[in-house]
Image (cartoon, rainbow, N blue to C red):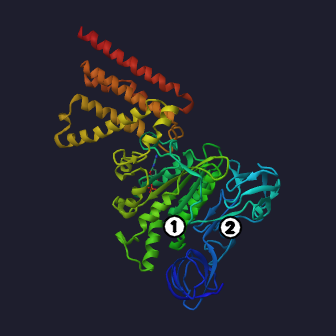
Amino acid sequence: MRKGVIVKVAGPLVVADQMQDARMFDVVRVSEKGLIGEIIEIHSQRAFIQVYEDTLGIGPGEPVESTGLPLSVELAPGLIESIYDGIQRPLDIIYERTGDYITRGITVPPIDRGRKWAFKPHKKEGDRVEGGDIIGSVQETVVVEHRIMVPISIKGTIREIREGEFTVEEIICRVETPDGMRDISMLQKWPVRKPRPYKKKLPPEEPLVTGQRVIDMLFPVAKGGTACVPGPFGSGKTVIQHQLAKWADAEIIVYVGCGERGNEMTDVLIELPQLKDPKTGETLMRRTVLIANTSNMPVAAREASVYTGITLAEYFRDMGYSVALQADSTSRWAEAMREISGRLEEMPGEEGYPAYLGTRIAEFYERSGKVICMGSDNRVGALTTIGSISPPGGDLSDPVVQSTLRVVKVFWSLEDRLAFQRHFPAISWLNSYSLYHDNLEEHMKKHVTEEFPEQRKEAMRLLQQEAELLEIARLVGMDSLSISDRLVLETTRSIREDFLHQNAFHEIDTYTSSEKNYLLLNLILQLHHLCEGMLEKVIPFQKIQGLRVREEIARAKYIPEDQLDQLREIEAHIRSEAEEVLREEGESNA
Ligand code: ADP
């Protein structure tokens, strides 16, 4: 292919002429240094290229060569436990070779070409296969079985399939197709900007249990769903992301970190690999792929990183796994879009973001879902996407927040007011929402309890009532509230402190199963109902407030998962103490 010539360099944007052979989204090599870039706009012979590496010292007259291929990721065993940059360069290997700063133009394959993997066939000679069928597997880490799939374009009969140790490029299977024999290795490529296909999208009816009470009970996300968590600084965004990575009911985690300042990313790079996976006792990295943009990488690489991440996540979804993609934070991605758009001199939209910001965000979240995967076995995979957003000053009218809220179905609103009060997780129960309640109702009724939906509604109603009562009390004083209003406040205090508040660093409190979640809230609501009955029988409020069982309820969240019977005992105590009070009161009245 003929080489083009640079005519202008503007930060991460390079303009080149004589590019008549190039196509949109082709990857190009810029200058003799071979910097990696991608064509994002073409006007006749002129190509506009976003460059993923520092363009310092590059100038007009230098050559540009198109590779003729779109920006793609490599898919094969070896992905798990890797730490990549936005264009899937393995940071750990580059670090070993070149030290702290990535040498420009360096090419290191994302997947190790020399490493051998023990391939175990699941199919045999003579079997008919189509794109997406699993032909065998590799034990990639102690916890992840990497399933090798037939590339989408291949359909035919297996003529040869091998067992043993192979590198990712060696041929493991030969398929006879109408167009001739096709060789299959464990390595596949996929262009990042093109969603991987599936057979059918399924309705999201199963919750992604996260073990976090406020999420699972009040604002649940479905497997295959989408959620966003705007987080002002210090509101507990990182802790929530870690809790989700650790506890969410997903087999694979893809974590995309786009940090602005260097230290934000270092936290993730250092802390995440150290987290222990409670389910397996191994480190969390055994089922995680990490994509990191450190501060010395140009903005354009951030733009690519969310696509790299979601493509890897789709690939694991296609194997039939439940995958959670965590993008932290998408604001940095949007800022990268804004910068490139500015350099292209496009007409700016709100706050200088490009007019297509909303479309890009929507396209990204739409790649999640619970699906029937390609292939003939109708396996189901799910990709759940959770994006955090860091709007300047925590301002929710920010265009990135607004565009995201238009597409995601769950909104966990972190409030610094709650974080100041040390109420963690600082997810506001008044502003947050989940649109999955109706979808998940049947599942919760069947697998947890029939009463789940009613219980949730009652808790929400009480919490909303609390906000109104506190407002009245603020205006005209606490004395203006009736006794039954005071009871509501007593109950909601308990909901907040004994139920919603959850300490991520407490051995037991850090995770709550759906069953325990229900039992805990049930205690608080049962007590509330009994107290309402007592008020009707004119039992003095102080007595109701001073019930001994309130202490037991306050400690109930620390009861281990294997001793949930204790929660049922507390329920019995609630009843016996209420009866006792009624009896005493009856006696003193007699
Ligand atoms: P952000 O990433 O939003 O700046 P962090 O996630 O680092 O905030 O949280 C700030 C601090 O808040 C943490 O260091 C921790 O002490 C506290 N914190 C946040 N969430 C929890 C939680 N669920 N349980 C206990 N402490 C928490």
What amino acid type is highlighted by mark number 1?
Answer: Gly
Tell me the residue that label 2 is attached to.
Answer: 93
Q: Is residue 176 visible?
A: yes
**Real-space CA distance between mark 2 and mark 1, rounded to the nearest whole angstrom:** 19 Å
Give residue 184's quadrant in the image: bottom right
Q: Is residue 280 left or right of residue 25?
A: right
Residue 554, placed above or below residue 207: above
Q: Is residue 502 visible?
A: no
Q: Residues within 10 Å of mark 2 (few under 14, many from 20)?
A: some
In which quadrant is the N terminus drawn? bottom right
Q: Is residue 238 above or below residue 498?
A: below
Left or right for 62, reference 348 = right
Tell me what residue is drawn at x 70 percent, y 52 percent: 133
Q: Quick one: 215 or 122, which is closer to the camera?
A: 122
Q: Residue drawn 71% across and 48% down?
A: 142
Regarding mark 1 in the picture, which secondary structure is present there?
Answer: helix
Taking depth in this image into account, of 91 and 397 the one nearest to the observer is: 397
Q: What element does badge 2 sit on?
A: helix
Instruction: Residue 194: give x, y in percent of width and height.
Output: 57, 64
Residue matched to label 1: 262
Residue at point 51% right, 58% down? 327
Residue type at the position of mark 2: Ile
Percent of width and height locating residue 123: 77, 49
Task: Report the mark closest to the observer, 2 or 1.
Answer: 2
Task: Please report the residue visible at 51 percent of the width from the left and 67 percent of the height from the top.
Answer: 262
